[in-house]
Amino acid sequence: MPMRYGRSVVFQGELGAFSQSAAQKLLGDNLRFLPCPTFADVFDVLKQKKADHAVIPIENTLHGSVHDNYDLLVECDYFVTGETKLRISHQLITMPEVTWRSVKQVFSHPVALNQCRRFFQKYPQIKPIPFYDTAGSVKMLQETRTPASGAIASVTAASIYGGRIQKRDIEDNPENYTRFFLLSKQRKAPKTTAGPGWKTSLVFSTPNQPGALFKALACFALRNISLTKIESRPIQGKPWEYRFYLDLEGPDNSDVVKRALSNLSELTDWMKILGSYQSTL
Amino acid sequence: MPMRYGRSVVFQGELGAFSQSAAQKLLGDNLRFLPCPTFADVFDVLKQKKADHAVIPIENTLHGSVHDNYDLLVECDYFVTGETKLRISHQLITMPEVTWRSVKQVFSHPVALNQCRRFFQKYPQIKPIPFYDTAGSVKMLQETRTPASGAIASVTAASIYGGRIQKRDIEDNPENYTRFFLLSKQRKAPKTTAGPGWKTSLVFSTPNQPGALFKALACFALRNISLTKIESRPIQGKPWEYRFYLDLEGPDNSDVVKRALSNLSELTDWMKILGSYQSTL
């Protein structure tokens, strides 16, 4: 049940979603949760300034980048002010009255289903059925009591919606982590420029010229600034042109990063600093 | 109906899928089609050498890269020997007995549903329902005659499965193109090294060192070799490490590309040439 007080945090999914756990890790307790059906809905809430924060998944070690969120960040006025990583474990959950042997279909988000391929190979009589959300699939079973059905979601979701965990940790690959961004109204920067463990995320596009990306990366390489991630996304309406997203080590108010960004602005036709932040372990 | 003779081409989706149209554009007529439910199934057929060719979507100008296929290419022994681009237009299709006004739910592949967001905003009474395939959703309606239902798929799919097009070209953005790779058993290279319009695709990983990607791109930039695409994908089992995919201009048997690739091999801990090819317009 949403609380009346505390900072408001919008996220995609139902209560019990992995994003909610990430929000608690990033912001602690006394939060007011605003669950939304889609990522677009999350960013709509931010556009109307109706939440203090958002927590969004940005990449997963098996699935890769969450492209919807990369695209939506470009138009968003909130800043990236934090990141955290969660180990993702998938549980096969049913309502208590459903026996494991009777399960014929299992609902979950397509990404979660895809991360449990071996489970479905081992039990070919069970059919995976795409659903809009992991926790939402358990909530749906609680409401509909659909017979012979299960859901794949978190331990938290099982607990919130009164589900029983029938098979634990059914993901194919245990090296399954999701990285989340915390978005906030106010930009964040370290008080001193020597703060260790800071990262900066930015996005830019270059003129469509040979070597343009190489020159952009040179701004950082020639200053010994490490990149931890690069991602390219198509620019809508400009077929075969791309935006580039970089995560680099260092806060955006340090001298060396400032100089690199100033250098980069000479080489790009558009750029945006998404924010500077530290990891919450 | 599959033909008895001709070269065999495996693709994801049912007959009438966009990949089938791409195959016809790339290979002409007299083909034997092997439709498969998933991309993993397509690559299983290749592993068993049971098809002459595969045609797979590799990127879309709205949705971005098709990551399943990027990942599956790494383990595949077939070579990229061609590429083509198709304009993707989505049609709202029903069986002939269904009236437009009665439609309450529409089945299609999640990517296609996502590319028709404005259509669903305009008609909020119609519910989008994810299905495994665009053409397959029309086939399903033909078989089940589910009432009050439609599908989003191609003009070809409407024709193959006896559907009626109720609304034409319902995609949000007309700049909607998909790029397809042709995969073949034998590597392809131009007879002379001066062949214009050739591209080479490759994938590599670098040691986890600062500036590693910058140095890799230098192999091409310093030789004035243009890159047309860069893509990063997580390496499974190695959280927060990435493989990089490059498309560059030039065939892999030209002197300058050979030297660049030899240079690159000094800087990577693993690399694979996926193939050289020309575009079929």
Image: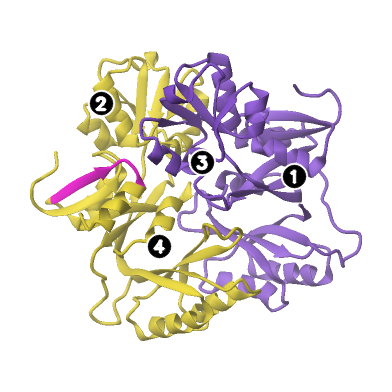
Chain colours: A yellow, B purple
Of labels 4 and 1, the one closer to you? 4
Q: Position of residue B85 (x, y in %)?
A: 69, 50
Q: Of the numbered discs in the image, which one, if any, rests on residue B111? A: 3
Of labels 2 and 1, the one closer to you? 1
Q: In the rendered view, tell whether residue B41 sits above or below residue B244.
A: above
B64 inside magenta stretch? no
Subunit that carries the residue with mark 2? A
A33 inside magenta stretch? yes
Contact between marks 2 and 1 (CB within 8 A): the answer is no
Q: Is residue A70 left or right of residue B184?
A: left
Q: CA distance from mark 2 to mark 1?
A: 46 Å
For the residue pair B162 and A257, the one nearer the viewer reads as B162
Subunit that carries the residue with mark 3? B
As shown in the figure, which amino acid type bears the numbered disc 1? Leu
Q: CA distance from mark 4 to mark 1?
A: 35 Å
The stretch in magenta equals A31-39
Q: Is residue A49 left or right of residue B6?
A: left
